[in-house]
Image (cartoon, grey):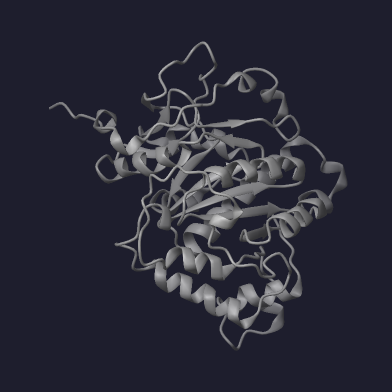
Amino acid sequence: TTTTATTQNLNTIQKNKLNENNNQKEIQKTSSSSSFTTDDIKNSMNSKAAKPDDNHSHHGDDSHSHHSDDSHSHHHSDDDKHNINTIKKLSNDRKNLSFSQKTAVVVLTFDRHFYLKRTLTNILAFLPKNYTLIVSQDGIDKRVRNLLSEHYPNIPTLRHRHNYLADDPEQLNPTPRYHAIADHYKFVFSKILDEMKFENVIILEDDMKIASDFFSYFENTAKLFETDSTIWTISAFNDNGQAGVVQDNRLLWRSDFFPGLGWLMTNKLWQELRPKWPAAYWDDWMREPAQRKGRVEIRPEISRSKTFGFEGTSVQEVDNKLEEILLNSKFIKFSSMNLDYLIEVLLF
């Protein structure tokens, strides 16, 4: 997949990667572009006092420590470059930081501005302090860009561009779209985990709704990574979580099926998967034995995330069972629960 970017973005992105002797032609070889409010991200990662991660109070836009700037333009100043470097340096010493300070929450979007607004409103209602919320836009849809700049100017934004469909208009079929989606995921993981060096990224898409205890769930289940190497991902979604089938909103499961739809990727796992990331159908690829290697996902009995989209690449799936998924409606404080039952017990 090839990507395009404005000359200003190209110059900024590549100055940190190329030697001063590289010429303009080398700079133009970049395959991706990004635009984000680096002051916001730096402040999130450099907070001296870690706030309680299990904060489930409702926050509006004013509760976030973002600062308005031109994050949605195609221009990066020298100050932006400096802040990018600062983020990388801060991320190398994070022992005293909380889970929320080490975790980015990224919403992937393409051209569904009407869904994106609903999703962001929902996330902001439950997002605790110290998290870094980022939107990653695939493509250059003006309606999405206008929504972000006019209604959410303080949310850091990444922009990924590809010319999959533009190169060959006759290729307007599902296959190129799934290729573009996989490439967008790879772009996000590379930016967040490789360049910005977050330890975790929680992935959401622009047609998803989360439960009030979504972040409490991730903050506390993520601790299981420290004691159980057989756990490789955590998801907020249960594919079989239809109303009438599930009933216990406190129960969590070990599963051998990767659910997706609101899940956590660790930096450690990304380093393993990055060299072989697929060109398309990334979620099916994640479910293959060669990737899973006998490891399990943690997922709830009653979902903490749900898709509401009826327009998009996989809309045929939403009209039936996904629409019937039950979203948890009662806040569960997972920090008060003993989750040791999820740890694998080895019998000798």
Eyeballing the image, is 294 above or below 80? above
Quick check: can you spot residue 162? no
Quick check: can you spot residue 133? yes
Residue closer to the observer: 102 or 239:
102
Q: Quadrant of residue 156?
A: bottom right
Q: Is residue 153 left or right of residue 225?
A: right
At horizontal 54% and vertical 15% (from top left) the residue drawn is 243
**Residue furthest top in the image:** 244
Eyeballing the image, is 317 above or below 140? above
**Residue furthest bottom in the image:** 21
Q: How many marks?
A: 0
Picture quarter with the N terminus = bottom right
Eyeballing the image, is 48 above or below 251? below
Q: Is residue 307 left or right of residue 145?
A: left
At horizontal 24% and vertical 32% (from top left) the residue drawn is 340
Q: Quadrant of residue 37?
A: bottom right
At horizontal 54% and vertical 58% (from top left) the residue drawn is 64
- Residue 142, horizontal then vertical, whole percent: 82, 55
**Residue furthest right in the image:** 169
Residue closer to the observer: 333 or 221:
333
- Residue 338, horizontal then vertical, whole percent: 25, 32
Q: Is residue 32 left or right of residue 6?
A: left
Eyeballing the image, is 84 above or below 227? below
Q: Quadrant of residue 326?
A: top right
Q: Is residue 46 left or right of residue 286?
A: left
Picture quarter with the C terminus = top left
- Residue 197, horizontal then vertical, whole percent: 45, 62
- Residue 41, horizontal then vertical, whole percent: 52, 65
